[in-house]
Amino acid sequence: MVCLGNICRSPVAEGVMKHHAQKQKLEIKVASAGTSGFHEGERPDKRSTSNAMLHGIDITNQRSRPVRKDDFENFDLVFAMDHSNYENLLALADAQYHHKIKMILNESHPGENLPVPDPYFGNDGFEEVFQLINGACEIIAQKLKNNEY
Ligand code: 4NP
């Protein structure tokens, strides 16, 4: 799960994906990272943490890290939160891994290429971010269960 800073959106995606994986009894590895290292080592933004907690999902133990080239070898699916993350991931990954890189909201809104809006500079939008990510992760878990990737 990848966004820019790995403190607002992708930590929520990591926590929510782990939640749905557990619910579906999937044995998968889930992680998140940022296309930038601006916030490396930091905990998720408090606004993301408290919003996730309202839904019973604890993301406080996560720490921001940048995407590494070996992530493309080590993970089968790489979900970008927005277009800029998507383009940056394609630029970083060798061509043989490009098929793994997807816009996360195409799972819930196929073919629309919608972004998860970046909530960092506003003070609201965290619940909308949660709902969008939750809808996509529910579908991702179902597709993994059905071997649809
Ligand atoms: P995220 O949000 O990509 O969802 O973690 C942001 C976090 C930090 C910045 C921008 C977006 N920043 O410019 O520092």
Image (cartoon, helix red, strand yellow):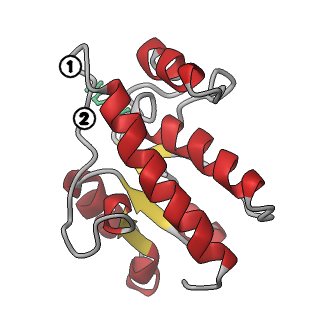
Residue 118 tag number = 2
Q: Residue at x 36, y 64 (%)?
A: 108
Res 45 → quadrant: top left
Res 125 → quadrant: top left
Q: Toward the viewer: 35 or 77?
A: 77
Can residue 35 be seen at all in this image of the molecule?
Answer: no
Left or right: residue 39 versus residue 120 is right
Residue 110 coordinates in the image, percent (x, y): 28, 73
Residue 16 coordinates in the image, percent (x, y): 58, 43
Q: Compared to 86, does 98 lie above or below?
A: below
Q: Is mark 2 within 8 Å of ligand 1?
A: yes
Q: Residue at x 25, y 35 (%)?
A: 118
What's the residue type where badge 1 is placed?
Answer: Phe
Residue 112 coordinates in the image, percent (x, y): 18, 68
Q: Which residue is mark 1?
A: 121
Label 1: how many residues lie within 10 Å, few (<14), some (14-19) or many (20+)?
few
Contact (Cβ within 8 Å) of mark 1 with mark 2: yes
Q: Secondary structure at mark 2?
A: loop
Q: Is mark 1 within 8 Å of ligand 1?
A: yes
Left or right: residue 125 versus residue 50 is left
Residue 45 tag number = none
Q: For the residues marked 1 and 2, what is the alpha-carbon distance in whole angstroms?
A: 8 Å
Can residue 140 be seen at all in this image of the molecule?
Answer: yes
Q: Compared to 83, does 57 lie above or below?
A: above
